[in-house]
Image (cartoon, rainbow, N blue to C red):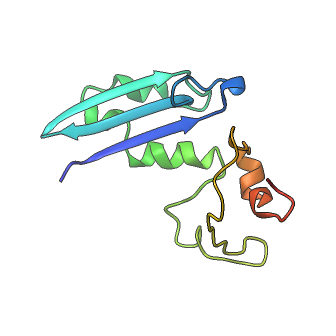
Amino acid sequence: MWQGTVWEVYEPLDQGGLPPLLYRRAIAAVSDGGRWTFSESGSRFPFEVAQAYELRRKRDRFNRELLYKYLAHFGLRPFSDDFYKPSGSQPAIVLERTRRRPEPATQYSLEEVVNGVPWKPDAT
């Protein structure tokens, strides 16, 4: 019903995340009841196609293709059929909350998460 493309990147405060949500970058092109809006905030990444943000039609300024390109810069392919398929190097993980999270919550980099560090027995 409501179409749009939204991308948000969050980082810890000491790495540039902005309070209160600790976001680094947000871009959105969404249909708000039939009228398209475009917004961006935070510091641009060097790989962004900034000239697209100047296109006449707001819906074209940030579309699915740009989102795919941006995610690829982080090594993510969530729209690929095999992205969620478990393998020997990327096993399936079941998460279960058995206790309240520590305060402050333990922070992990994207590389650590991809490598499974948060799920290893010695992780806090």
Q: Could you tell me residue 104's position as x and y percent?
A: 69, 38
Residue at (54% x, 23% y) in the render: 19
Which quadrant, please, contains the N terminus?
Answer: bottom left
Residue 35, picture quadrant: top left
Residue 87 in the figure: left or right of residue 7: right
- Vertical placement of residue 47 versus 85, above or below: above
Give whichever of 54, 24 is nearer the camera.
24
| Residue most extreme to the left | 34
- Vertical placement of residue 45 versus 106, above or below: above
Residue at (72% x, 42% y) in the render: 107
Q: Could you tell me residue 58's position as x and y percent?
A: 26, 31
Give whichever of 119, 73 is nearer the camera.
119
Residue 16, picture quadrant: top right
Residue 96 in the figure: left or right of residue 29: right
Residue at (60% x, 28% y) in the render: 45
Q: Could you tell me residue 56's position as x and y percent?
A: 25, 25
- Vertical placement of residue 34 versus 56, above or below: below
| Residue most extreme to the right | 122
Q: How many labels were placed on the picture? A: 0
Residue 108 in the figure: left or right of residue 52: right
Residue 23 in the figure: left or right of residue 2: right
Residue at (66% x, 25% y) in the render: 13
| Residue most extreme to the front | 99
Q: Could you tell me residue 57's position as x and y percent?
A: 24, 31
